[in-house]
Image (cartoon, grey):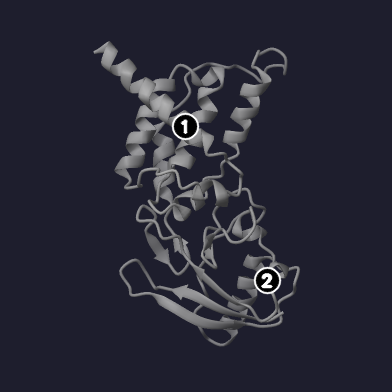
């Protein structure tokens, strides 16, 4: 298969960027999108040209590092990470536009690579769990209802890729923060720091420069982990309850 690529090229954060036209020739239909970029880069290197910078790690849709926008869709077509997009998804001869996430809180590093450490700082702001849980308990030793356990597991599936913020017109990180807060708010181990966690993570999100949620649901539509937007409602409830708790205490 052959494709015409419009790839965003930018040497660094302060450099002027733009799209570069590159031909991707003889690409196997079963190749993943990242494997296609590998093939293109190998040919660019042989021609003495600068390869395209992009991130990847596990290439199994787990780590979330392969963050890029493919034909206007964060992480590309389908409901997986960019590494799970296969070239058979496209038609032979298609023109494909590839660019980095356009989120102010994710400054560009080079080409398709952005710095998503803002998410790391938000997680760090949530602090540690002080509850001593000891060794791994038996499955039936800790009584957690199935509904709560399922919701916690669903929220914990978030891989922190940043697609939600990239898809949101406001560059909101509410789906990501909502998933992290919801996960621990439903489990017994997360109760001691429950209020402080919600306050600190929301404040950290605001300090990083992410926008507010306006209920576009674009985040839910592109999330590779299928996180439900209901976690945003949970985040709002947790935050309001934490604020009231602080005001009453004072």
Give the class, few, some or many, for how many residues have Cα within 10 Å of label 1's Cα (few <14, many ≥20). Answer: some
Q: Is residue 132 above or below residue 231?
A: above
Q: Residue at x 42, y 56 (%)?
A: 115
Marks 1/2 in contact by CB < 8 Å: the verdict is no
User: Which is more foreground, mark 1 or mark 2?
Assistant: 1
Identify the residue at horizontal 46%, vertical 64% (top origin). Answer: 100
Q: What is the quadrant of residue 243 in the picture?
A: top left
Q: As rendered, which of 119 and 75 lies closer to the eye?
A: 75
Asked if residue 197 can be seen in this view, the reply is: no
Q: Earlier in the sequence, mark 1 or mark 2?
A: 2
Per the image, the residue denoted by label 1 is: 233
Q: What label sits on residue 90 in the rendered view?
A: 2
Q: Is residue 245 left or right of residue 4?
A: left
In the image, residue 160 sits, relative to residue 198, either above or below, namely: below
In this picture, is 108 found above or below 244? below
Q: Could you tell me residue 206's position as x and y percent?
A: 32, 41
Helix, strand or loop status at disc 2 = loop
Relative image position of residue 222 (x, y in whole percent): 56, 52
- Image coordinates of residue 127 in percent, x first then y, are 42, 29
Question: From this viewpoint, is residue 207 visible?
Answer: yes
> Is the N terminus in the top left, top right, bottom left or bottom right quadrant?
bottom right
Mark seen at residue 139: none
Q: Residue at x 44, y 21 (%)?
A: 194
* Number of callouts: 2
Would residue 165 be found to the left or right of residue 105 on screen?
Answer: right
């Amino acid at each position: 298969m052959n494709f015409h690529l419009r790839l965003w090229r930018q040497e660094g954060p302060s450099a002027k960027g733009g799209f570069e036209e590159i031909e991707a020739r003889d690409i196997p239909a079963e190749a993943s999108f990242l494997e296609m970029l590998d093939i293109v880069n190998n040919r660019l290197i042989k021609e003495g040209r600068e390869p395209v910078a992009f991130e990847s790690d596990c290439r199994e849709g787990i780590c979330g590092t392969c963050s890029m926008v493919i034909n206007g869709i964060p992480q590309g077509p389908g409901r997986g990470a960019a590494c799970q997009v296969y070239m058979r998804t496209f038609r032979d001869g298609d023109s494909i536009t590839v660019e980095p996430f356009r989120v102010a809180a994710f400054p560009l590093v080079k080409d398709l690579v952005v710095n998503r450490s803002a998410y790391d700082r938000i997680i760090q702001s949530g602090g540690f769990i002080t509850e001593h849980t000891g060794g791994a308990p038996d499955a039936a030793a800790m009584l957690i209802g199935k509904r709560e356990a399922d919701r916690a597991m669903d929220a914990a599936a978030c891989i922190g890729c940043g697609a939600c913020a990239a898809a949101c017109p406001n560059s909101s990180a509410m789906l990501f923060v909502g998933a992290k807060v919801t996960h621990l708010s439903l489990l017994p181990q997360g109760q001691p720091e429950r209020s402080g966690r919600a306050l600190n993570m929301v404040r950290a999100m605001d300090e990083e420069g992410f926008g507010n949620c306006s209920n576009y649901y674009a985040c839910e539509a592109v999330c590779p982990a299928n996180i439900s937007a209901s976690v945003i409602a949970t985040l709002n409830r947790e935050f309001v309850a934490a604020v009231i708790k602080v005001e009453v205490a004072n």
